[in-house]
Amino acid sequence: VGDRSTTVAIVDNGCDAMHPDLVANLLPGRDVVENDDDPSPAAATASANHGTACAGLVAAVGNNGIGISGVCPGCTLRCIRMLAERGMM
């Protein structure tokens, strides 16, 4: 199930830092696109969920009755938003 000392970086279009399956495992993130510390996706579009979905596959908390369990639910995550939505930047 992993270990808290193992941190996996998710480099994508951002992660929903308030997602109930992720919040317990998230460390502070980074947004390279907007040069701040909020790695949240920029837009409420279907593609904005890609980074959050990838983060869930890695470290979503299991056995909580919400969504899925990640392959490493005991690991920590650091989300880095490095990809802008199509048409931005």
Image (cartoon, rainbow, N blue to C red):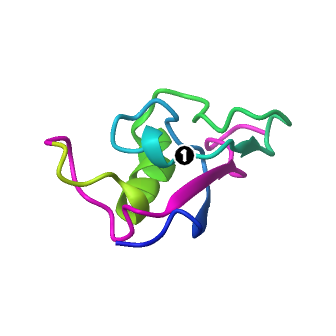
Q: Position of residue 74 (x, y in %)?
A: 41, 63
Residue appearing at x 81%, y 45% in the figure: 32
Q: Range of the magenta residues?
A: 65-89
Residue appearing at x 42%, y 72% in the figure: 2
Residue occupied by mark 1: 26
Residue appearing at x 53%, y 43% in the figure: 15
Above/below status of 54 relative to 44? below
Q: Position of residue 21 (x, y in %)?
A: 34, 43
Give the position of the N terminus as an image quadrant: bottom left
Residue situated in front as seen by the camera: 63 or 58: 63
Please indicate whether residue 61 sits to the left or right of residue 18 in the image.
left
Q: Is residue 68 magenta?
A: yes
Identify residue type, mark 1.
Answer: Leu
Q: Is residue 52 magenta?
A: no
Above/below status of 82 relative to 34? below
Q: Quadrant of residue 62?
A: bottom left
Q: Position of residue 7 (x, y in %)?
A: 60, 65
Residue appearing at x 59%, y 67% in the figure: 5
Above/below status of 67 relative to 57? above
> Does dot 1 land on a helix, a strand or a loop?
loop
Above/below status of 48 relative to 68? above
